Amino acid sequence: MWMVGYNDGGEDHHSFSSGRKLRPLIPRGPVMSSTSSPNNTTSTTPPSSLSRIHHGTDFFSQYHNLEQSKREFNTSPPVVVSSRWNPTPEQLRALEELYRRGTRTPSAEEIQHITAQLRRFGKIEGKNVFYWFQNHKARERQKRRRQMESPAPDSLDKEDLGASRTVFEVEQTKNWAPSTNCSTLAEGGFLGLVLNIHVIWGICGLNTKSSKSCRLLQNRWVDPIG
Amino acid sequence: MWMVGYNDGGEDHHSFSSGRKLRPLIPRGPVMSSTSSPNNTTSTTPPSSLSRIHHGTDFFSQYHNLEQSKREFNTSPPVVVSSRWNPTPEQLRALEELYRRGTRTPSAEEIQHITAQLRRFGKIEGKNVFYWFQNHKARERQKRRRQMESPAPDSLDKEDLGASRTVFEVEQTKNWAPSTNCSTLAEGGFLGLVLNIHVIWGICGLNTKSSKSCRLLQNRWVDPIG
DNA sequence: GCAAATTAATGATTTATTCAAG
DNA sequence: CTTGAATAAATCATTAATTTGC
C-alpha cells in the first residue's frame, strides 16, 4: 500500500484485532488522546503540548532512532529477502522530509548523496530514491487532483472506489432524505435549498464544488448572507 | 461575529516568560472554571436557542432524544453563555455517524445542510460543523499515526513508469544550500559526519550539475560504475 | 458530598504546505 | 516567480472530567 504522506481516508475504526505486526510500545506518544477513556490512576504526563518538528537541525540524524536493523536480518533461518526495496521508517521519513522541504526531482548527485545517507538505515539503491521521488510527486499531484474534483466522498477505503462510492451515494441520499418540514425556518427560504440539496447531493456529490452563498475564506468559515 | 481581527491593546498575560510569539487576544482574565464565575467571557451569541423538536425519519431524527434544552437556560439570572459551541449528544452522534460513513471535508453546501439539520438539537452554526470535521479528521489521523508510528510501509507497487521523460534534469537545489551553521550540536562524532555531508551536499548540489558517474537512461536509473 | 485543583478533550485560530494558474 | 485556493498541522484557549483535601 505505501500510503505516503497524508491520507486521511480509510479510517474505519472498527476493531480489527490487528494481529499483524507487533510493536512493543509506542516510542513517543506525548499528547492527545492516550486512549479514549482516561480514567487514569497514576498521574500521567502533563498535557503540555510538545511534538515539535525540528526544522533546521541536522537532517539525517533525526531519523536515526531505534529500530532499523531488524528488517531483513533478524529472522533466523528463513531470511525472506524481499525482491524489491522497502523503505525503512527512517528512510521514509527522511524522504518525506526532503520532499516537504522542496526536493522534487533530485539530480543524479543528489540522488547519490541521499542514497548514501539513507543507507545507514537499511538497504537502498539510487534507483529507489529516484523512483520514490518520481512516484511521490506524481501521487501527490494525483491526490490533489482527485480532491479537487470530488470533495465529498474522499475516503471510504481506497478499494474499488467506484463501487463503494456508489453505495455511499445511495446511502447518503437515502439518509438525508427530505425529512419534510424541517422546521427551523429561521433562515427563510433556506429550507427549499436544503431539500433540493438532499436530492442533488447524491447525484452531484461527485462534481459539485461550487459554493456561492457560503464559502471558506482564509481557512475560516463564513456564513452565507451575513 | 466571532471576533475577526486582532485587538489593538497590548495586554498579554505574562504567564510564561518564554519568548513565544504573542498572540493578540481578548484579555482573558483569570481562568475560571465552568459556572459560578461570570467574570467575563466574551459572550457572543445570545442565549436564544430554542431547540426545535421534530420527529422525522431521516438520518438526523434518530439522534433525537431527551436532553436538549438544559444547556443554557436553566440558571436564572446569570445566564452564563458558553463562549464556544458544545455539541449536544445528538449532534455529536450525528456528526460521528456522518464521519463514520465517509464524510470528511464537507463542502459549503453540505455544511449548511448538516447545520440546518442539527439545529434541531440545539444551537449550532456552520463554522461549528466545519471545525468539527476539520478537528475530528485531524485527530483521528493523529491517533492513527501515533498508533502506527513507523510501521514499515510495505510495497511501492504500481510504478507509473509509463509516461517517460528521457532526460533527467535538475531543478531544485536551493534547499540544500550550505548556510545554516547547524548550531544544535548534540550528538557525538556521528553528528560531525552528518554536518560535513550537509556542507558537501550543499556545495555539490549547487555547483555540479553534470553527472558522469551516474545517469538516467530512458527514465531509468543507472547506477554509477557497475 | 463538594468545590478547588488538575488533567484530558476538544472547539477555534493561526501557520505552513501543496499544486498549479497567471 | 508569484499568488490563490484548499487543507493539514500546530497551537491556543475553554470546557468537561477527574482527582483531591477537607
Image: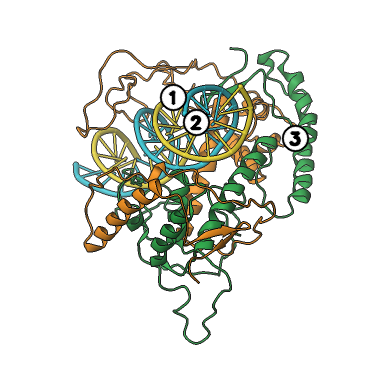
Chain colours: A green, B orange, C yellow, D cyan
Q: Secondary structure at mark 1?
A: loop
How far across and how far down the image is residue B107, in percent? 65, 30
Of callouts 3 and 2, the N-terminal one: 3
**Whether marks 1 and 3 lie on the same chain:** yes
Dot 1: chain letter:
B
Q: Is the residue under label 2 in contact with that under label 1 (CB below 8 Å)?
A: yes
Q: Residue at x 44, y 61 (%)?
A: A115
Q: Secondary structure at mark 3?
A: loop
Dot 1 alpha-carbon crowd within 10 angstroms: few under 14, some 14 to 19, many 20 or more:
some
Residue B58 disc label: 3
Q: Residue at x 24, y 45 (%)?
A: B181
Q: Residue at x 78, y 50 (%)?
A: A163
How far across and how far down the image is residue B11, in percent? 25, 18
Q: Amino acid at mark 1?
A: Ser
Residue bearing mark 2? B86
How far across and how far down the image is residue B98, in percent? 65, 40
How far is disc 3 from disc 2 in space, using C-alphas?
Answer: 23 Å
How far is disc 1 from disc 2 in space, using C-alphas?
Answer: 8 Å
Left or right, A101 with respect to B178, comes to right
Q: Amino acid at mark 2?
A: Asn
Of callouts 1 and 3, the N-terminal one: 3
Dot 2 alpha-carbon crowd within 10 angstroms: few under 14, some 14 to 19, many 20 or more:
some
- Compared to residue A84, the image places residue A15 above or below, namely above
How far is disc 1 from disc 3 in space, using C-alphas?
Answer: 30 Å
Q: Amino acid at mark 3?
A: Asp
Residue A196 disc label: none
How far across and how far down the image is residue A76, in percent? 47, 85
Residue bearing mark 1? B82
